């Protein structure tokens, strides 16, 4: 175990030998110093946790804690493995290229190996609520896990989400984005779960693709359409959903770092 020297935030590292994924999973744990003295706190899991040191995540937390802008929480940054494009995705529904084939195994790792390991790590510490976040494909994975496990998770942070994930190539005859975007179809076919909340981020320079020629890049189109599906399902656009569009923002860690403080403070807001 390694521990940072910060007086405000501890940064510990654990390795889980996952039977579901057949590999070691590195996890960085960020929490306020003295977290075990709290009877309970919120838990946030972040896919693509290897990106957090790049964005100076510990410094972001230190500033927020020092200014008393967020409540104590345990944050676990899950490092992606070499087979990231198969482990992230939509469980049991690979995309048109067969990617995401291990998404169900990744979900099982999160629920059956990671969360119990974190409970053991913090011993008697209990979690008031659990949230999950991610970047790009990691965001797609986070939303899929939240949507299918509302008994475990209540909030999702979705940065530059790969919501284009589709069962048919956009160049194929008969492609219909109302039918072939997998996560949109999952939301449309699912049920309303009370208490879920969603945070979305997109940059206006996230990409340059505009498959339907409407003058809006696909990542923003896909995100706004997904928000529309959530609203149709019954989620309140103002109370349950936050959407931040970053002017000039790119599909990169620097852009996500700019929005991370807003997301962490949003997590602490009471709905309504």
Image (tube, rainbow, N blue to C red):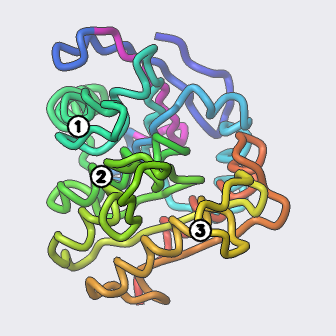
Give how far across and how far down residue 246 sits, in percent. Answer: 75, 65
Identify the residue at image location x=41%, y=59%: 156
Q: CA distance from mark 2 to mark 3?
A: 25 Å
Residue 97, percent from left and from top:
36, 32
Neighbourhood count class around disc 3 (C-alpha, 10 Å): few under 14, some 14–19, many 20 upward:
few
Q: Is residue 29 magenta?
A: yes
- Give the extent of the magenta segment: 23-35
The residue carrying mark 1 is 107
Q: Is residue 269 left or right of residue 96?
A: right
Q: Decide whether the magenta segment is chiefly helix, strand or loop.
A: strand
Question: Of label 1 and label 3, which has the lower sequence position?
Answer: 1
Labelled pair 1, 3 in contact (Cβ < 8 Å): no
Q: CA distance from mark 2 to mark 1?
A: 9 Å
Q: Earlier in the sequence, mark 2 or mark 1?
A: 1
The disc placed on residue 144 is: 2
Residue occupying the point 43% across, 18% down:
81
Marks 1 and 3: which is nearer the front?
3
Give the mark nearer the N terminus: 2 vs 3. 2
Is residue 18 rendered magenta in the image? Answer: no
Few, some or many C-alpha atoms within 10 Å of disc 1 (few <14, some 14-19, many ≥20)?
many
Label 3 SS: loop
- Location of residue 267 with respect to 255 vertically, above or below: below
Residue wearing tag 3: 212
Query: Is 178 or 87 nearer to us in this picture?
Result: 178
Q: Quadrant of residue 15?
A: top left
């Amino acid at each position: 175990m390694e521990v940072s020297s910060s007086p405000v935030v501890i940064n510990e590292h654990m390795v889980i030998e996952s039977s579901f994924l057949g590999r070691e999973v590195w996890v960085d744990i960020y929490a306020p110093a003295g977290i075990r003295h709290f009877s309970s706190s919120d838990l946030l899991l972040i896919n693509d946790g290897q990106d957090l040191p790049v964005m100076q995540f510990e410094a972001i937390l230190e500033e927020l804690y020092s200014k008393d802008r967020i409540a104590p929480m345990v944050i676990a940054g899950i490092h992606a493995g070499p087979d990231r494009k198969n482990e992230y995705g939509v469980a049991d529904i690979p995309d048109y290229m067969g990617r995401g084939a291990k998404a169900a195994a990744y979900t099982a790792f999160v629920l059956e190996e990671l969360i119990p390991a974190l409970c053991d790590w913090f011993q008697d510490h209990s979690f008031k609520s659990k949230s999950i976040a991610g970047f790009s494909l990691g965001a797609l994975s986070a939303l899929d896990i939240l949507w299918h496990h509302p008994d475990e998770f209540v909030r999702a942070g979705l940065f530059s989400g790969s919501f284009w994930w589709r069962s048919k190539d956009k160049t194929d005859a008969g492609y219909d984005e109302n039918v072939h975007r997998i996560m949109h179809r999952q939301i449309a076919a699912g049920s309303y779960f009370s208490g879920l909340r969603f945070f979305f981020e997109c940059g206006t320079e996230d990409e340059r693709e505009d498959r339907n020629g409407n003058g809006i890049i696909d990542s923003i189109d896909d995100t706004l359409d997904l928000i529309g599906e959530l609203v149709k399902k019954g989620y309140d656009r103002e109370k349950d959903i936050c959407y931040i569009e970053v002017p000039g923002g790119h599909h990169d860690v620097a852009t996500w770092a700019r929005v991370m403080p807003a997301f962490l403070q949003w997590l602490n807001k009471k709905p309504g």
